[in-house]
Image: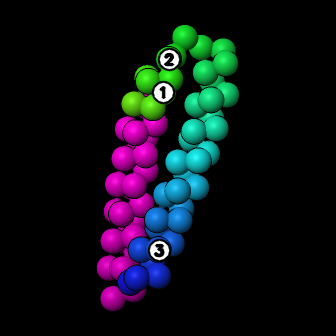
Amino acid sequence: PFMYGLYGFFVFMITIILLKIFLLLIDSSSVFTIKENDFILGLLGFFAFFIIRVVNNSKFKKDK
């Protein structure tokens, strides 16, 4: 279980980095401010973490 949690955290960090880069690319051609981007990033990160948690829980149930 610990390794699965570590893997989930690793995927979570990669997702955050990719979203940050994605939002920075969008920022160059939009009217979003940095604060708004950080707020959106926080929401996306929260949803991504929640989805990963649900997927991991379903995997554990299938294994057992």
Report, in whole angstroms, how far the alpha carbon at label 1 lies from the one at label 3.
Answer: 27 Å
Instruction: Please tell me whether residue 53 belongs to the stretch shown in magenta.
Output: yes
- Residue at 32 percent across and 79 percent down: it is 61
**How many other residues sit within 10 Å of disc 1, few (<14), some (14-19) or many (≥20)?**
some
Instruction: Please tell me whether residue 32 belongs to the stretch shown in magenta.
Output: no
Residue 45 in view: yes
Q: Relative to 36, is 48 above or below?
A: below
Residue type marked 2: Thr
Residue type marked 1: Asn
Residue segment shown in magenta: 40-64
Residue sitting at the far bottom: 64
Location of mark 1 (residue): 37
Q: Is residue 53 left or right of residue 38?
A: left
Residue 62 in view: no
Report, in whole angstroms, how far the alpha carbon at label 2 lies from the one at label 3.
Answer: 33 Å
Nearer to us in this view, 52 or 23:
23
**How many other residues sit within 10 Å of disc 2, few (<14), some (14-19) or many (≥20)?**
few
Location of mark 3 (residue): 6
Q: Are marks 2 and 1 in contact (CB under 8 Å)?
A: yes
Q: Quadrant of residue 27?
A: top right
Location of mark 2 (residue): 33
Q: How many marks?
A: 3
Q: Residue 34, image x and y in percent?
A: 50, 23
